[in-house]
Amino acid sequence: MEFSHDDNNNLPLTKFESMLKTNHVLFFDSEEFENIIHHYLNQGKIALAKKAIKLGLDQHPSSITLKLFKVEIYVFEDKLTEADTLLNELYLLDPSNEEIFIQKANIFSKKDEHEKAVEVLKKAVQLTDDAVDIYSLIGMEYLFLDKFEEAKEYFMKCLEEDLEDYSALYNVIYCFEFLDQTEDAIQYLNVFLDKNPYCEVAWHQLGKQYYTLKKYKKALAAYDFAIISDDSFIGAYLERGKVLERLQRYEEAIENYNITLKLDDPTSFALLRIGYCYEKLKHDDLAVQYYYKTVHEDPLLDKGWIAITQYYKRRKNYQKALYYINKAINIDSENVKYWKLYSVINQRLNHFEEAERGFKKTLELGNYELSTWLSRGDLLIKLGEPEAAIYNFQQASEFYPENAEIEYRLAGLHFSLNETDKGTFHLKNGLRFNEEFGFIIDELFPEVANKLLVKNLLKENQ
């Protein structure tokens, strides 16, 4: 029984805490100790739980339940050997106690021995009249093993016992989604809703499955039923807003997002989506206002800063776009998306050194897209740094071997440095990989394109 601070059930707890402040040891029956320990564990007050266990076992040394609490503490503190030893002793005393098996499974799980944990939990199922919690534990162990079919089966068993076990329902759908079984998930949810037609969680999940299949009208209907079942269900309004956006019904989408703002504190997601909708409706002033609200609500949300930056970039107001992407970088200097956008904007402003620095930072942060290597290399060419450009493209070729765009650039660079043999090598590679990219020589290296050797090599492949 859980103790509450607003009723008389907390009398043993009050008495226990009063006892701790004095030298007087008071007597409690074992059930009272169990409730006290359970309360402290739920509150995360481990030190007080340990005190209660010790005093409880001093007064009731044969209590298996109190000793199982001791096992639980051992497991929590990663004292798995001590926990295992005590469990073995308890098994000899009470071999049909399912809690002993559950704790044994917990130890196996802690050791990443999930198959053994499942085996032990299946034995526990045979010993109990209330198997729901154990089914859930078995399902979780199968998740650890990436056995999603088996996990799904056991979470379904939970729902067969308790239709309102929403945690199990979420886990069932998670398994369906991981296995890409969207149609099966829809079929399961429809059967489930036949039994529990006012389950807002199931309607919400059904809507998400239809959304995945781009069946937006069916998704909308599912979210409508979720809202009928619970008109304060924020998740349903948010998802309904997303569907309405897909259907280009932007005013209605805004209405749904606004409802979520009234039901609870504003979320950056809802504010951002409202901004997108207003932009689609050509209400630019309102759109940008909501983008500002988004970053004010959550300065760490990159989508908010990107939305503002892209807003000004689309309107060719590159100075303002640069101002906001710089603010974003000052908040999170390790965000790859920020640096890439920073580089593109600086390019538009002809700030080539800054753009190159941005692409370099993007690569340092692990963005190895071909376009990043090519953009940085082309900027280095423009900045008159051929050696640095060659090194950039050599690195790029490690990620993208046999890439014609890289080979033509290396050819042009080596020819421009009068390294004829290297230039010829890379030009022949480029022609072999894809002769259609030969225009790169003309565009980036016009002086090289006029060289007789280069002209002849290009003509041979026409």
Image (cartoon, grey):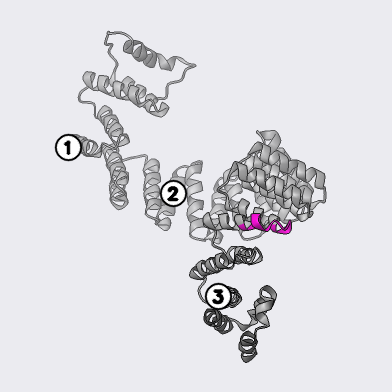
Residue at x-position 67% and y-position 40%? 295
Residue 445 percent coordinates (x, y): 66, 75
Secondary structure found at label 1: helix
Q: Going 47% across and 45% down the picture, which residue do you hit?
A: 168
- On the question of residue 86 being in view, the answer is yes
Q: Which residue is mark 2?
A: 155
Is label 2 in contact with label 3 (beta carbons under 8 Å)?
no
- What is the magenta segment's predominant secondary structure? helix
Residue closest to the eye, 107 or 2 = 107
Q: Real-space Cα distance between discs 1 and 3?
A: 69 Å
Residue 446 image position (x, y, % from top left): 69, 77
Where residue 459 appears, as percent x and y from the top left, is 65, 90
Q: Earlier in the sequence, mark 2 or mark 3?
A: 2
426 or 175, which is in the foreground? 426
- Between tags 2 and 3, which lies in front? 3
Magenta segment includes 112: no
Task: Tell me if residue 94 can be seen.
Answer: no
Residue 403 is marked as 3
3D distance between C-alphas at marks 1 and 2 = 32 Å
Residue 116 left/right relative to 161 = left
Q: Nearer the viewer, mark 1 or mark 3?
A: 3
* Percent position of residue 187, x then y: 55, 57
Q: Amino acid at mark 3?
A: Asn
Say which quadrant the C terminus sits in.
bottom right
Q: Which mark is residue 92?
A: 1
Secondary element at image label 2? helix
Above-or-below relation of 402 to 280 = below
Dot 1 amino acid type: Leu
Q: In this picture, is 93 found above or below 144?
A: above
Region in magenta: 347-356
Q: Secondary structure at mark 3?
A: loop
